Every structure is written in structure tokens, then in C-alpha cells.
């Protein structure tokens, strides 16, 4: 079926921000670049113009609401599928997956249902829909093992396709220019004068902000001066949590050493200006894109050895891995890395092009019935 133009419909709750949304755009761009038809159905969001610019079509449907009212969209989706005649229906979240599952009932078998599990959702009947795809894409071996442990799923239906980064967006050895540095330190003068630690993550205690603050305090007690940026923690709906963090910073005597910021679009330069990028989530994560973004820039990463973060650090930067909840070891390792961090080679794996190529190859194998290709599990590790 070489040269056949595929039609692929991806479904997501919305297109505002996050790993799911980024993957939708990345796969959509790859489909369009390869001459296929890419259609995305979602509730809309700020990323829609970019999606369309990259060559995809967008259809607005509120398919992400966790409510029985969402069932009203089943008929509409069925009509859309009849009109579009997709080769692949790819659901990336639970509510859209349930709606697509019901909408595809009685539709031609040539419409293949694929799901991607982006997170370690609580196991149960509601989450089990993500295992119903003809092929289930897991974004890491951590996710694959989680699915096998909690669901009755044939491991051969799971395809490991890790997320990837664009080396042009995160070039090896990149350093911010003087103009950016001057602007950054003018905005955050507290961060000047000592090695910068950066912990990126939304405003939730799951991201380990308290451990990062306590780490700076512990290093200070050892006579090691550092600064800390909690990048992306300030969000309109997280005011109470931000206030809680500010109180903790004041209690630790760190008001002149720690900055809380809103999400920024220049994370590449922030990471590149950092002596250490932290990944201290107290709950296992499915992947950990921050790890590969920072390492791609040749910046050391320090994180807990659990979930997808631990998986990536074990393979790519073992020196940055510490046992979860071992704060003493965290402080020791931070001091070691600040003194002399091991060399970081250019990233040869976890590249965006690899993820895009593997996903499109999976689509093609389903449509062509290439059983040999379907039996092989794509993995980068």
C-alpha cells in the first residue's frame, strides 16, 4: 500500500497545554508532512491555530467533560466518522476513548481503533477503556508494565513508543545569549550570584516543590550557595498552593534565594542557564519529558528513581538518580553534581522524529495488515 493516503482522526479533550496536546500536534504535523489527512477532534484551545498551520484539520466537539452528558456526542462522532471515513481513530484520553469506542460500534472494520496511554491513571473500569485499542501505545516501559500488572491485556497488543524531543529545539550545548541572560536576571535578581536549580512543573504538591525548597535549605546549611526557580508553579487556580509554598520559603529563610514563576515559553534557555534541573515528583510519572529536554541541552538532571523519570535516568544519566524519598541522598548527590557533574553525551535516542516515524508505521501496519510489523514492539530502550 505504498503511496496510499491515510486518514487519521485523533481525539483529545482540548488543545491548550500538556503532553497529550503536544503529542497530538507532533503526530498531526508528521501526518500532514507525509501527505496524509490529519483530523483532530477536541474541545479547542490555544494550540488550534498552530495545529491548523501545520496542516491538520480541527473539529470542535466538547468530548473531554467527565460527565454522562458527554454521551450525547456519540451520535455526532458516528456521523463524523461516516463522513470522514478514517483509517485510524486514535484516542488519547479516557472520555474521548469511551465516546469513540461506542461511536465505532457497527462501523466498518476498516476503521482501526488505537489508544495511547500517557499517564498512570488509577486502575479500574473507567481507565480500562485505554486498553481497548487494537494496539495500545505506551509512552514508556513503565506504562507498559503498569498496564500488564493491572489489566488483562495481551502484551503483544502494547507498543512502546516513547515521547521525543526535537534536537533543533533543544540543541546540544546550547547557552542563552547575553541579552536573554540580562533580561532573565533583571526580572529575577534573586537568582543571580549562585548556581541555579530549576524544578519545572505545574502548581501541585505532586511535583515535589517542598523537597526542592528543603534541598536549597540543606545545601545552605552545608555552606553551598544555590538559587531555586520553581518554573510554572504560579497558575490562576493554584493561588492557595502558591501561598503555602511562599510561607514555607519564608520559614526556611530562603526568600532571597527562591523564585516562583508562571509558565514560560523560553524553557530551553532556562534549562540551559541551570546548574541542575530537578525532577522530584512524589508520584511516579509515565514518562518525564523534562529529563530528555535538559539532557539534550547537556544539562545535568537530578531526580527520584521511580516511574518514567527513573527509567530515563537509569538509561541516560545514572549519576542523577537517587532513591525516592531518601532526602539525605538527594542532598549528597546534589552537592556532588554541583561540584563536578559527569559529562553528558549528545542525545541519540528519544528523538521526535523517531516517535513520529514509529507512530505512522504503526498506523500503516494496521491498515495494510502487516502482521509481522504488528508483532514487533517498537522501543527505544
Image (spheres, rainbow, N blue to C red):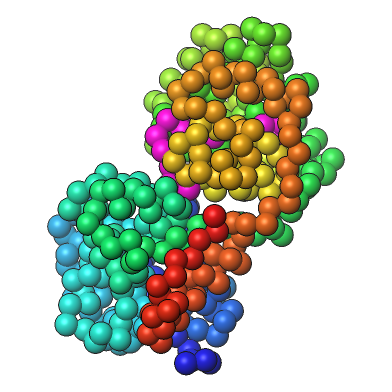
Relative to 127, residue 202 above or below: above
Q: In terms of image quadrants, where is residue 232?
A: top right
**244 horizontally vs 347: left or right:** left
Does residue 196 show up?
Answer: no
Indicate the position of residue 59 as horizontal and vertical percent values. Answer: 37, 73
Residue 282 highlighted magenta (yes or no): yes
Residue at 51% x, 31% y: name it: 304
Q: How many tags in the picture?
A: 0
**161 horizontally vs 63: left or right:** right
The magenta span reads 274-287
Q: In terms of image quadrants, where is residue 166?
A: bottom right
Residue at 51% x, 70% y: name it: 358
Indicate the position of residue 170 as horizontal and vertical percent values. Answer: 69, 52
Relative to 154, residue 325 above or below: above
Residue 296 highlighted magenta (yes or no): no
Indicate the quadrant containing the C terminus: top left, top right, bottom left or bottom right: bottom right
Q: Main secondary structure of the magenta part?
A: loop
Nearest the viewer among 313 and 54 is: 313
Amino acid at each position: 500500500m505504498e503511496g496510499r493516503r491515510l486518514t487519521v482522526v485523533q481525539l483529545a479533550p482540548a488543545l491548550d497545554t500538556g503532553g497529550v496536546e503536544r503529542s497530538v500536534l507532533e503526530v498531526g504535523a508528521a501526518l500532514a508532512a507525509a501527505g496524509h489527512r490529519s483530523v483532530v477532534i477536541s474541545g479547542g484551545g490555544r494550540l488550534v491555530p498552530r495545529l491548523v498551520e501545520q496542516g491538520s484539520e480541527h473539529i470542535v466537539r466538547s468530548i473531554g467533560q467527565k460527565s454522562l452528558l458527554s454521551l450525547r456526542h456519540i451520535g455526532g462522532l458516528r456521523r463524523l466518522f461516516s463522513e470522514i471515513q478514517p483509517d485510524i481513530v486514535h484516542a488519547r484520553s479516557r472520555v474521548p476513548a469511551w465516546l469513540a469506542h461506542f461511536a465505532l460500534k457497527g462501523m466498518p472494520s476498516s476503521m482501526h481503533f488505537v489508544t495511547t496511554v500517557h499517564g498512570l491513571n488509577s486502575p479500574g473500569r473507567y481507565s480500562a477503556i485505554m486498553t481497548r485499542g487494537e494496539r495500545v501505545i505506551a509512552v514508556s516501559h513503565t506504562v507498559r508494565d503498569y498496564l500488564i500488572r493491572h489489566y488483562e491485556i495481551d502484551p503483544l497488543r502494547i507498543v512502546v513508543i516513547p515521547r521525543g524531543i526535537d534536537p533543533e529545539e533543544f540543541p546540544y550545548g546550547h547557552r542563552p545569549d547575553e541579552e536573554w541572560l540580562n533580561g532573565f536576571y533583571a526580572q529575577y535578581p534573586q537568582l543571580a550570584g549562585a548556581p541555579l536549580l530549576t524544578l519545572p512543573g505545574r502548581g501541585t504538591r505532586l511535583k515535589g516543590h517542598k523537597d526542592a525548597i528543603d534541598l536549597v535549605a540543606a545545601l545552605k546549611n552545608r555552606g553551598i550557595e544555590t538559587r531555586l526557580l520553581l518554573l510554572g508553579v504560579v497558575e490562576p487556580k493554584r493561588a492557595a498552593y502558591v501561598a503555602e509554598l511562599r510561607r514555607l520559603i519564608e520559614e526556611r529563610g530562603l526568600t532571597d534565594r527562591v523564585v516562583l514563576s508562571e509558565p514560560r515559553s523560553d524553557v530551553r534557555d532556562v534549562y540551559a542557564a541551570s546548574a541542575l534541573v530537578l525532577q522530584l515528583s512524589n508520584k511516579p510519572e509515565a514518562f518525564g519529558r523534562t529529563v530528555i529536554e535538559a539532557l539534550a541541552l547537556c544539562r545535568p538532571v537530578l531526580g527520584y528513581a521511580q516511574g518514567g523519570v527513573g527509567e530515563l535516568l537509569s538509561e541516560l544519566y545514572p549519576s542523577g538518580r537517587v532513591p525516592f524519598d531518601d532526602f539525605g541522598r538527594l542532598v549528597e548527590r546534589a552537592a556532588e553534581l554541583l561540584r563536578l557533574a559527569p559529562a553528558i553525551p549528545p542525545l541519540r535516542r528519544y528523538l521526535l522524529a523517531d516517535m513520529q516515524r514509529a507512530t505512522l508505521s504503526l498506523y500503516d501496519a494496521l491498515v495494510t495488515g502487516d502482521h509481522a510489523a504488528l508483532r514487533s514492539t517498537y522501543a527505544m530502550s
